Amino acid sequence: MKTILYYVHDPMCSWCWGFSRVLNELLESLPKEIEVHRLLGGLAVDSDVPMPDNIQQTIKSNWSRIEDRIPGVKFNFDFWSKCIPRRSTYPACRAVIAARQQGQQYDLLMTKEIQKAYYQDALNPSDNITFIKLAENLNLSIEKFEKDLLSDKVQEQLMEEISQARELFAESFPNLVLQVGDENFSIPIDYNNSKIMLDEITKRLTNLNSG
């Protein structure tokens, strides 16, 4: 029976950034027969409107809460004075898909680049010019990346992934869904202990196999 662990995320989701270390630990410890599929959930649609002050304050508070809750995670709050933030994450999602067109490994690599640019280097992750710089960092074909970034194909792929995430009832991020055959199981996120999630996955598989 085919088993898939879906990881649903958004490159501009601050909790996803906080989760990245423990997620890596979980994925490294998974049984080999479990396939891992990454899906982009798309937090916020395209917008050129500056982010309202109340939304900025909410996200700043989230950053502080994540730093308190997850040891070792730090944010560069200079972003809020250096950039004009927009509540628009679809561009970052498209950048991940555009990078993926040059190799599956670039899905994760571009995600990491966007997170570093946003949370560490205080660069605007809603601007295409930022993604071009990041593509250069990854030694991608810039001509192809720019073309793909603006293509209908990449936009359609994003909408397909958002739709698939909703079908899995994964509408908050980060999100883990274990699919075994035709059955889906939500795996509760633990930001500090990968073993708790691994144990839940193992329990689900054991129960199904014994049933």
Image (spheres, grey):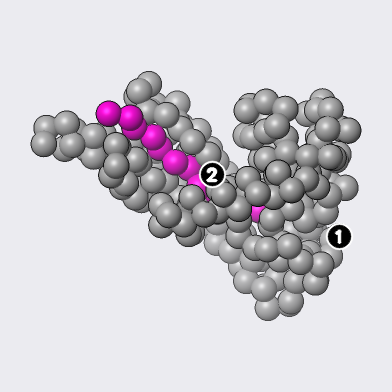
Q: Would you call the spot at circle 2 few (<14 residues within 10 Å), some (14-19), or many (20 or more)?
A: many
The residue closer to the viewer here, 125 or 54, is 125
Q: Position of residue 72 (x, y in %)?
A: 57, 44
The residue drawn where x is 73% and y is 77% is: 53
**Vertical placement of residue 84 versus 168, above or below:** below
Q: Is residue 165 left or right of residue 102?
A: left
Residue 110 falls in image quadrant = top right
Residue type (three-letter) at the residue carrying disc 1: Lys
The residue closer to the viewer here, 41 or 191, is 41
Q: Position of residue 148 (x, y in %)?
A: 78, 40
Magenta span covers which residues? 1-13
The residue closer to the viewer here, 18 or 158, is 158
- Is residue 199 visible in the rendered image? The answer is no
Q: Is residue 158 left or right of residue 2?
A: right
Q: CA distance from mark 2 to mark 1?
A: 30 Å
Q: Which mark is residue 39?
A: 2
**Residue farthest toward the left in the current orientation of the protein:** 211
The residue drawn where x is 68% and y is 78% is: 54
Residue type (three-letter) at the residue carrying disc 2: Leu
Q: Would you call the spot at circle 1 few (<14 residues within 10 Å), some (14-19), or many (20 or more)?
A: few
Residue on which the image places disc 1 = 82
Q: Quadrant of the N terminus?
A: top left
